[in-house]
Image (cartoon, rainbow, N blue to C red):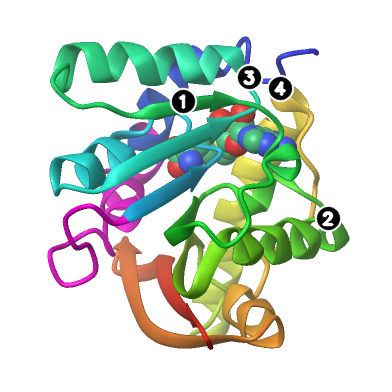
Amino acid sequence: MRDKYKYIGPVYDFLSNLYSGRSIHRCKTAMLDLETITPGARILFAGVGHGRDALRAAELGAEVTVVDLSETMLRKFAQAQETEAPHLNIRRIHSDIMNVDEFGQYDMVIANFFLNVFDEDMMVRVLAHLIQLGKPDAQVVVGDFSYPSGNPIARLFKKGYWYLAVFIFWLLANNAFHKIYNYPDHMQRLGLKITRQKHFKLLNMNCYWSILGQKQA
Ligand SMILES: C[S@@+](CC[C@H](N)C(=O)[O-])C[C@H]1O[C@@H](n2cnc3c(N)ncnc32)[C@H](O)[C@@H]1O
Protein backbone atom coordinates (compact mmCIF):
# COMPACT_ATOMS: atom_id res chain seq x y z
CA MET A 1 0.00 0.00 0.00
CA ARG A 2 1.55 3.36 -1.06
CA ASP A 3 1.78 5.91 1.74
CA LYS A 4 0.49 9.14 0.23
CA TYR A 5 1.60 11.12 3.29
CA LYS A 6 5.16 9.78 3.28
CA TYR A 7 6.71 13.17 2.41
CA ILE A 8 4.22 15.72 3.69
CA GLY A 9 3.16 13.67 6.73
CA PRO A 10 6.19 14.42 8.93
CA VAL A 11 5.62 18.19 8.63
CA TYR A 12 1.82 18.15 8.47
CA ASP A 13 1.10 19.81 11.83
CA PHE A 14 3.91 22.33 11.35
CA LEU A 15 2.44 23.36 7.96
CA SER A 16 -1.05 23.48 9.41
CA ASN A 17 0.05 25.92 12.14
CA LEU A 18 2.01 27.99 9.64
CA TYR A 19 -1.01 28.18 7.33
CA SER A 20 -3.67 28.94 9.91
CA GLY A 21 -2.05 30.37 13.05
CA ARG A 22 -3.57 28.07 15.64
CA SER A 23 -7.04 28.26 14.08
CA ILE A 24 -7.02 24.72 12.67
CA HIS A 25 -5.94 23.30 16.01
CA ARG A 26 -8.69 25.21 17.82
CA CYS A 27 -11.21 24.00 15.25
CA LYS A 28 -10.16 20.37 15.72
CA THR A 29 -10.58 20.50 19.48
CA ALA A 30 -13.70 22.69 19.51
CA MET A 31 -16.18 19.96 20.38
CA LEU A 32 -13.93 18.18 22.84
CA ASP A 33 -15.08 19.40 26.24
CA LEU A 34 -16.74 18.03 29.33
CA GLU A 35 -20.15 18.93 27.92
CA THR A 36 -19.78 16.55 24.95
CA ILE A 37 -17.42 13.91 26.32
CA THR A 38 -18.36 11.72 29.23
CA PRO A 39 -15.67 9.55 30.83
CA GLY A 40 -15.57 6.17 29.11
CA ALA A 41 -17.29 7.42 25.96
CA ARG A 42 -16.06 5.51 22.91
CA ILE A 43 -14.66 7.92 20.33
CA LEU A 44 -13.31 7.14 16.88
CA PHE A 45 -10.99 9.55 15.04
CA ALA A 46 -11.03 8.94 11.28
CA GLY A 47 -7.82 9.94 9.44
CA VAL A 48 -6.27 11.01 12.72
CA GLY A 49 -2.98 12.45 11.44
CA HIS A 50 -0.72 13.67 14.26
CA GLY A 51 -3.79 13.54 16.48
CA ARG A 52 -3.46 16.19 19.21
CA ASP A 53 -7.27 16.24 19.16
CA ALA A 54 -7.37 12.50 19.92
CA LEU A 55 -4.93 12.99 22.81
CA ARG A 56 -7.21 15.71 24.20
CA ALA A 57 -10.24 13.39 24.03
CA ALA A 58 -8.34 10.61 25.81
CA GLU A 59 -7.19 13.08 28.46
CA LEU A 60 -10.83 13.95 29.09
CA GLY A 61 -11.44 10.28 29.89
CA ALA A 62 -12.73 8.96 26.57
CA GLU A 63 -11.87 5.50 25.28
CA VAL A 64 -10.22 6.51 22.01
CA THR A 65 -9.62 4.59 18.78
CA VAL A 66 -7.70 6.24 15.95
CA VAL A 67 -7.65 5.13 12.32
CA ASP A 68 -5.29 6.20 9.57
CA LEU A 69 -4.28 4.76 6.23
CA SER A 70 -0.84 6.37 6.37
CA GLU A 71 1.93 4.64 8.25
CA THR A 72 3.81 7.94 8.44
CA MET A 73 0.85 9.70 10.07
CA LEU A 74 0.33 6.88 12.56
CA ARG A 75 4.02 6.99 13.44
CA LYS A 76 3.76 10.75 14.07
CA PHE A 77 0.71 10.09 16.22
CA ALA A 78 2.60 7.45 18.21
CA GLN A 79 5.51 9.86 18.74
CA ALA A 80 3.19 12.64 19.91
CA GLN A 81 1.53 10.28 22.35
CA GLU A 82 4.87 8.98 23.59
CA THR A 83 6.17 12.48 24.38
CA GLU A 84 2.97 14.23 25.44
CA ALA A 85 0.77 11.57 26.99
CA PRO A 86 2.56 8.23 27.50
CA HIS A 87 0.14 7.29 30.28
CA LEU A 88 -2.83 7.17 27.90
CA ASN A 89 -4.06 3.97 26.35
CA ILE A 90 -5.20 4.65 22.78
CA ARG A 91 -6.11 2.01 20.24
CA ARG A 92 -4.47 2.50 16.83
CA ILE A 93 -5.79 0.98 13.59
CA HIS A 94 -3.74 1.15 10.39
CA SER A 95 -6.45 0.80 7.75
CA ASP A 96 -8.63 2.39 5.14
CA ILE A 97 -11.59 3.72 7.13
CA MET A 98 -13.94 1.97 4.70
CA ASN A 99 -12.57 -1.37 5.96
CA VAL A 100 -13.39 -0.57 9.57
CA ASP A 101 -16.64 -2.41 10.22
CA GLU A 102 -17.27 -1.79 13.92
CA PHE A 103 -20.81 -0.64 13.18
CA GLY A 104 -22.96 0.90 15.91
CA GLN A 105 -20.15 0.94 18.46
CA TYR A 106 -19.06 4.54 18.93
CA ASP A 107 -20.56 7.37 20.99
CA MET A 108 -18.76 9.93 18.87
CA VAL A 109 -17.07 9.79 15.47
CA ILE A 110 -14.72 12.62 14.53
CA ALA A 111 -13.65 13.64 11.03
CA ASN A 112 -11.26 16.57 11.36
CA PHE A 113 -9.91 17.81 8.03
CA PHE A 114 -10.45 14.28 6.77
CA LEU A 115 -13.46 14.38 4.43
CA ASN A 116 -11.81 17.02 2.25
CA VAL A 117 -9.30 14.47 0.92
CA PHE A 118 -12.04 12.77 -1.16
CA ASP A 119 -13.98 13.77 -4.26
CA GLU A 120 -17.60 14.62 -3.49
CA ASP A 121 -19.19 11.23 -4.28
CA MET A 122 -16.61 9.38 -2.23
CA MET A 123 -16.84 11.97 0.57
CA VAL A 124 -20.57 11.29 0.89
CA ARG A 125 -19.94 7.53 1.01
CA VAL A 126 -17.24 7.97 3.66
CA LEU A 127 -19.47 10.26 5.74
CA ALA A 128 -22.35 7.74 5.53
CA HIS A 129 -19.93 5.02 6.65
CA LEU A 130 -18.74 7.11 9.62
CA ILE A 131 -22.35 7.66 10.66
CA GLN A 132 -22.92 3.89 10.56
CA LEU A 133 -19.97 3.34 12.90
CA GLY A 134 -21.80 5.40 15.55
CA LYS A 135 -24.33 4.09 18.04
CA PRO A 136 -27.99 4.92 17.29
CA ASP A 137 -27.72 8.26 19.17
CA ALA A 138 -24.06 8.97 18.36
CA GLN A 139 -22.57 12.38 17.76
CA VAL A 140 -20.61 13.01 14.56
CA VAL A 141 -18.14 15.90 14.37
CA VAL A 142 -16.84 17.40 11.15
CA GLY A 143 -14.10 20.03 11.44
CA ASP A 144 -12.99 21.59 8.17
CA PHE A 145 -12.85 24.63 5.90
CA SER A 146 -16.11 26.53 6.15
CA TYR A 147 -18.33 27.09 3.17
CA PRO A 148 -17.49 30.52 1.68
CA SER A 149 -19.85 33.18 2.99
CA GLY A 150 -19.82 36.94 3.56
CA ASN A 151 -19.19 39.74 1.08
CA PRO A 152 -17.69 39.00 -2.38
CA ILE A 153 -14.16 39.93 -1.26
CA ALA A 154 -14.34 37.63 1.77
CA ARG A 155 -15.69 34.81 -0.41
CA LEU A 156 -12.92 35.32 -2.94
CA PHE A 157 -10.27 35.32 -0.20
CA LYS A 158 -11.65 32.11 1.31
CA LYS A 159 -11.74 30.36 -2.04
CA GLY A 160 -8.17 31.43 -2.86
CA TYR A 161 -7.01 30.34 0.58
CA TRP A 162 -8.67 26.93 0.11
CA TYR A 163 -7.34 26.38 -3.40
CA LEU A 164 -3.79 27.03 -2.17
CA ALA A 165 -4.13 24.17 0.32
CA VAL A 166 -6.00 21.81 -1.98
CA PHE A 167 -3.42 22.39 -4.73
CA ILE A 168 -0.52 21.52 -2.40
CA PHE A 169 -2.24 18.35 -1.17
CA TRP A 170 -3.32 17.37 -4.69
CA LEU A 171 0.31 17.73 -5.78
CA LEU A 172 2.03 16.08 -2.82
CA ALA A 173 -0.52 13.59 -1.49
CA ASN A 174 -2.68 12.98 -4.55
CA ASN A 175 -5.81 14.18 -2.71
CA ALA A 176 -8.87 15.11 -4.75
CA PHE A 177 -9.01 18.62 -6.22
CA HIS A 178 -12.44 20.10 -5.58
CA LYS A 179 -14.44 23.06 -4.29
CA ILE A 180 -15.19 23.59 -0.60
CA TYR A 181 -17.96 21.25 0.55
CA ASN A 182 -21.09 22.33 2.37
CA TYR A 183 -20.76 19.79 5.19
CA PRO A 184 -23.88 20.73 7.22
CA ASP A 185 -26.02 20.14 4.10
CA HIS A 186 -24.48 16.71 3.56
CA MET A 187 -24.77 15.81 7.23
CA GLN A 188 -28.45 16.74 7.31
CA ARG A 189 -29.13 14.87 4.08
CA LEU A 190 -27.64 11.77 5.72
CA GLY A 191 -30.02 12.09 8.66
CA LEU A 192 -27.98 13.99 11.25
CA LYS A 193 -29.45 16.85 13.24
CA ILE A 194 -26.99 19.74 13.54
CA THR A 195 -26.83 20.66 17.21
CA ARG A 196 -23.80 22.96 17.41
CA GLN A 197 -21.52 24.89 15.08
CA LYS A 198 -18.41 26.84 15.99
CA HIS A 199 -16.46 29.15 13.67
CA PHE A 200 -12.76 29.95 13.63
CA LYS A 201 -11.23 33.01 12.11
CA LEU A 202 -8.22 33.96 10.09
CA LEU A 203 -7.71 37.69 9.41
CA ASN A 204 -11.08 38.27 11.03
CA MET A 205 -12.88 36.00 8.53
CA ASN A 206 -14.56 32.73 9.40
CA CYS A 207 -12.39 30.23 7.56
CA TYR A 208 -13.00 27.03 9.52
CA TRP A 209 -15.90 25.44 11.32
CA SER A 210 -16.59 22.53 13.57
CA ILE A 211 -20.04 21.02 13.17
CA LEU A 212 -21.64 18.69 15.67
CA GLY A 213 -24.32 16.39 14.28
CA GLN A 214 -26.52 14.03 16.26
CA LYS A 215 -27.81 10.73 14.93
CA GLN A 216 -31.55 10.42 15.32
CA ALA A 217 -32.22 7.13 17.14
C1 LIG B 1 -5.66 16.13 5.69
S1 LIG B 1 -5.08 14.90 6.79
C2 LIG B 1 -5.89 15.32 8.30
C3 LIG B 1 -5.24 14.72 9.51
C4 LIG B 1 -5.86 15.09 10.86
N1 LIG B 1 -7.23 14.64 11.00
C5 LIG B 1 -5.78 16.56 11.10
O1 LIG B 1 -6.80 17.23 11.14
O2 LIG B 1 -4.65 17.04 11.28
C6 LIG B 1 -6.02 13.49 6.23
C7 LIG B 1 -5.65 12.21 6.94
O3 LIG B 1 -6.53 11.19 6.51
C8 LIG B 1 -5.78 10.01 6.24
N2 LIG B 1 -6.54 9.22 5.25
C9 LIG B 1 -6.73 9.51 3.94
N3 LIG B 1 -7.53 8.60 3.36
C10 LIG B 1 -7.84 7.71 4.33
C11 LIG B 1 -8.64 6.55 4.37
N4 LIG B 1 -9.28 6.11 3.27
N5 LIG B 1 -8.77 5.88 5.54
C12 LIG B 1 -8.13 6.31 6.65
N6 LIG B 1 -7.35 7.42 6.69
C13 LIG B 1 -7.21 8.11 5.54
C14 LIG B 1 -4.44 10.51 5.75
O4 LIG B 1 -3.44 9.54 5.86
C15 LIG B 1 -4.23 11.72 6.65
O5 LIG B 1 -3.61 11.37 7.86
Mark 3 sits on what residue? 5
137 part of magenta stretch: no
Residue 114 placed where, x, y %?
A: 58, 47
Which tag, 2 or 4, sits closer to the chain's start?
Answer: 2
Q: Report how far apart the C-alphas of labels 2 and 1 lie in the structure.
A: 24 Å
* Front position among marks 2 and 1: 1
Give the mark nearer the N terminus: 1 vs 4.
1
How crowded pointer 3 is (Cα within 10 Å; few <14, some 14-19, many 20+) is rated as many
103 relative to 113 in the view: left or right: right
Q: Which quarter of the rendering shows the N terminus?
A: top right
Disc 4 CB within 8 Å of nearest ligand 1 atom: no
The answer to which of 83 and 183 lies nearer the viewer is 83
Q: Residue 167: x, y in percent?
A: 71, 38
- Element class at badge 2: helix
Residue 149, placed above or below residue 47? below
- Dominant SS in magenta: loop
The amino acid sitting under disc 4 is: Leu
Work out whether residue 215 or residue 210 is closer to the camera in this orientation and state it.
Answer: 215
The residue identified by callout 4 is 172
* Residues drawn in magenta: 18-41
Sequence-wise, the earlier of marks 3 and 2 is: 3
Label 1: state its secondary structure.
strand
Q: What residue would you read off at disc 1?
A: 92
* Label 3 lies in ligand 1 vicinity (Cβ under 8 Å): yes
Q: Secondary structure at mark 3?
A: loop
**Is residue 38 shown in magenta?**
yes
Name the quadrant containing residue 127. Answer: bottom right
- Inter-mark Cα distance, 2 to 4: 20 Å
Position of residue 93 measured from the top left corner of the image (x, y, whole percent): 54, 27
Asked if the residues shown at circle 3 and circle 2 are in contact, with their CB atoms under 8 angstroms apart, the answer is: no
Upstream in sequence: badge 2 or badge 1: 1
